[in-house]
Amino acid sequence: MLARALIGEEVDDDRLDLILRALADRTRRALLARLAEGPARITDLAEPFDMSLVAVSKHLKVLERAELIERDIEGRVHQCSFQAAPLREVERWLDHYRVFWHGTLDALANHVEDEHDSSTEPKPEENADGGE
Amino acid sequence: MLARALIGEEVDDDRLDLILRALADRTRRALLARLAEGPARITDLAEPFDMSLVAVSKHLKVLERAELIERDIEGRVHQCSFQAAPLREVERWLDHYRVFWHGTLDALANHVEDEHDSSTEPKPEENADGGE
DNA sequence: TCTATTGTAAACCATATGGTTAAATAACTT
DNA sequence: AAGTTATTTAACCATATGGTTTACAATAGA
């Protein structure tokens, strides 16, 4: 099905738009860096930043829509945790260009070896949360 | 100098903001994909897109500011060519997170081997568990 | 020189983004 | 029940973004 392939590309573009736009803000990258060290509550996440908690809350929602974080609500506390999957999609997009700095194809192969089963992508189920 | 390090980080953030924002648009990614196959004039770059040449020209300027393309002006013709360097910066930023999907450090080392001379900090930390 | 081609600049528009404050909701504590 | 804490929603604001059309500048070709 050609149509499927085309729609697939559009979906990819939608995903990449969402992910890259989420990453294209230093506050959100900083939030992500903090969350990569472990889950945290929103109040704690907001504390180091020189902006209102509401602003941070909005940033987190952008990250959440891009699936870069997951939210676990316990009572009134929202626990956020880092999710790596979207970064793999960025990585996969970069694969198209990596040849430009690796120069040689066999250096590229190093990388492909890790991706070869997920590139056709039936099930990308990688979980990086260290929470439980 | 500590101040130098801090400024350095801010500069990185500026660069990443610029680069990731440039990449966070499907038209610009498509332009980049086309240019990765070889240099092209602006008119030819614009032709496949369903928007004015002016719009494409603006997109190209965004890519140029991020140094993702270079422009070679010959007479009235602007020849654009792909520049990979900023993508390496994205790659380097991703290094901090690659451990989340490689899991093991030696898979990561494959990657670092290529970066060791171009990066100021060749050791990304590996913290996957809940911290404080 | 006149005209067509290549591209930018300017002015404009609608919507998105990143921030604010104030109010609302929900869940713990006392 | 009353108050405090955690977070979102709503309303608002300034600026950025992605697009348009029209006008301009510069080069190339007749």
Image (tube, coloured by chain):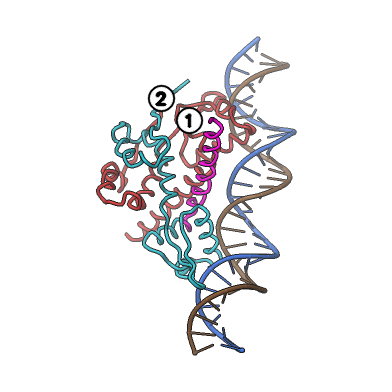
Chain colours: A red, B cyan, C blue, D brown
* Helix, strand or loop for disc 1: helix
Magenta segment range?
B1-28
Q: Is disc 1 on the same chain as disc 2?
A: no
Tell me: B112 left or right of C9. Answer: left
Q: What separation in Å lies between label 2 and label 1 (alpha carbons)?
A: 10 Å
Tell me: B69 left or right of B112. Answer: right
Give the main secondary structure of the magenta stretch. Answer: helix
Vertical relation: B131 (above or below) A70: above
Q: Residue B110: say if magenta.
A: no
Within-10-Å neighbours for mark 1: few <14, some 14–19, many 20+ = many
Residue at label 2?
B129
Q: Residue at 35% of width from left, 36% of height from top?
A: B101
Front in this rendered view, residue B2 or B87: B2
Vertical relation: B88 (above or below) A3: above
Residue at label 1?
A35
Q: Residue at 45% of width from left, 27% of height from top?
A: A37
**Residue A46 pos. (x, y %):** 58, 29
Hey, what amino acid is under mark 1? Leu
**Residue A51 pos. (x, y %):** 64, 34
Q: Residue at 45% of width from left, 60% of height from top?
A: B31
